[in-house]
Image (cartoon, rainbow, N blue to C red):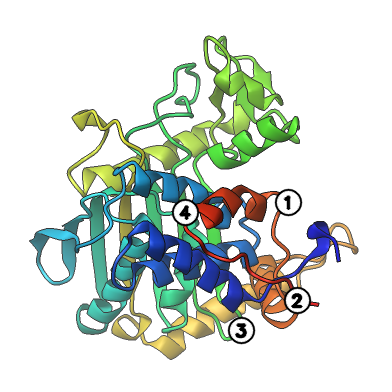
């Protein structure tokens, strides 16, 4: 078996990642929660925002830029609405806690919203959605990083926004619909991977400093720097631009902390909202509508018979089920990149399945 086709048990990868984080100093259940969501991201196919982030997190812990212990501080709390100051605690752990808390509060209030300021990076948004959808609830999750900018407003050339992802989980009678998109055409993580590997974008996803569309990710680090294009590109980028303004308002506006404060450290502002369909027209009525639309999409005559219509999240859940039964094949270089940390922290590498 070669490294390229090696497969690993999800539990073994989670234990490996959790042990690295615990030996690096994270306390309580933080190592297990972060590890679980990172591995889930890889299993769902989001390979730039799973274990690929772990080395950076370990460096942040070592440098003292990620807090290792404690709880978020409560800025305000009205039951159905709360604001947390994450105090630079691990963003994956804080966000998982926020979604779980919002699920419980939605049972009481019908809907619950939590805005989070000063979180560390939260990795893959899609990996949090099942916390709510498995409980029969709909969830909206978005994040932004007020310390950085890669995306210019439509028609502009100077970066103002990060890719500003937004995700939605919608229960149906079958698999949940799991939407994970962003206000920009692609992510900073994929752009960096393509630069390292000498690749190009599959389309004109960026622009140089003069506003000329490009498929070269190197324009993002040129002097002067280019920017990622909003979703919709040079033609319809006003759509992604509008989405970015929404995400920034949800995450930074409602948490009361963001770009206006001059944040300089890598992190996230986050917004979570969970809806309990039972509190609206009822769970059965909700699923009747969502399943009708989902089925209309699943059975829609495809333009290309070889490519049937899929709902958002179908590929991710199929990948997860395959990883659960056959093991997970990680993207090239991920485990190799973690070897120096594993050696320094005396954590044995996981063993591949035979």
Disc 1: which residue: 332
Disc 4: which residue: 123
**Residue 255 percent location from the top left of the image:** 20, 49
Q: In this view, does 108 lie above or below 162?
A: below
Measured Cα–Cα span from mark 2 to mark 3: 31 Å
Residue 158 located left or right of residue 215: left
Q: Residues within 10 Å of mark 3 (few under 14, many from 20)?
A: few
Q: Residues within 10 Å of mark 4 (few under 14, many from 20)?
A: many
* Residue 124 is at least partly visible in this image: yes
Which numbered disc, 1 or 4, marks the residue that appears first in the sequence?
A: 4
Q: Using the image, tell me which numbered label, if any, was put on residue 174.
A: 3
Measured Cα–Cα span from mark 4 to mark 3: 26 Å
Please identify, in this view, whether the residue under mark 1 or under mark 4 is nearer the observer.
1
- At x 24% / y 56%, what residue is drawn? 115
**Residue 297 percent location from the top left of the image:** 69, 69
Please identify, in this view, whether the residue under mark 4 or under mark 3 is nearer the observer.
4
Disc 2: which residue: 353
Which numbered disc, 4 or 2, marks the residue that appears first in the sequence?
A: 4
Q: Using the image, tell me which numbered label, if any, was put on residue 199.
A: none
**Residue 176 percent location from the top left of the image:** 55, 76
**Residue 117 percent location from the top left of the image:** 23, 49
The tally of labels here is: 4
SS at badge 2: loop
Measured Cα–Cα span from mark 1 to mark 4: 19 Å
SS at badge 1: loop
């Amino acid at each position: 078996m070669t490294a390229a086709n090696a497969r690993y048990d999800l539990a073994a990868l989670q234990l490996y990642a959790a042990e690295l984080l615990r030996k690096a100093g994270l306390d309580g259940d933080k190592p297990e929660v972060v590890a679980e969501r990172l591995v889930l991201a890889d299993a769902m196919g989001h390979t730039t925002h799973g274990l690929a982030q772990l080395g950076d997190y370990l460096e942040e812990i070592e440098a003292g830029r990620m807090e290792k212990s404690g709880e978020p501080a409560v800025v305000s709390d009205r039951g159905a609405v709360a604001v947390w100051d994450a105090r630079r605690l691990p963003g994956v752990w804080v966000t998982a806690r926020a979604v779980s808390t919002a699920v419980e509060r939605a049972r009481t209030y019908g809907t619950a919203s939590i805005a989070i300021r000063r979180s560390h990076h939260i990795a893959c948004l899609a990996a949090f959605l099942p916390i709510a959808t498995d409980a029969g609830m709909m969830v909206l999750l978005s994040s932004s990083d007020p310390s950085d900018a890669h995306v210019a407003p439509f028609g502009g050339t100077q970066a103002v926004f990060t890719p500003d992802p937004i995700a939605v989980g919608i229960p149906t009678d079958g698999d949940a619909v799991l939407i994970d998109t962003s206000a920009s055409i692609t992510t900073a993580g994929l752009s960096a991977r393509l630069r390292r590997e000498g690749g190009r974008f599959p389309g004109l996803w960026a622009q140089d400093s003069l506003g000329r569309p490009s498929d070269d990710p190197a324009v993002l680090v040129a002097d002067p720097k280019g920017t990622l294009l909003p979703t919709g590109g040079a033609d319809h980028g006003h759509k992604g631009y509008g989405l970015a303004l929404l995400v920034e308002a949800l995450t930074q506006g409602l948490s009361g902390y963001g770009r206006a404060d001059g944040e300089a450290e890598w992190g996230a502002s986050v917004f979570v909202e969970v809806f309990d369909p039972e509190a609206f027209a009822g769970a059965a009525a909700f699923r009747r509508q969502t399943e009708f639309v989902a089925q209309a999409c699943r059975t829609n005559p495809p333009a290309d018979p070889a490519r049937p219509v899929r709902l958002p999240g179908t590929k991710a859940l199929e990948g997860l089920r395959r990883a659960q039964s056959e093991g997970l094949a990680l993207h090239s270089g991920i485990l190799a990149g973690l070897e120096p940390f594993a050696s320094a922290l005396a954590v044995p590498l996981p063993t591949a399945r035979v």
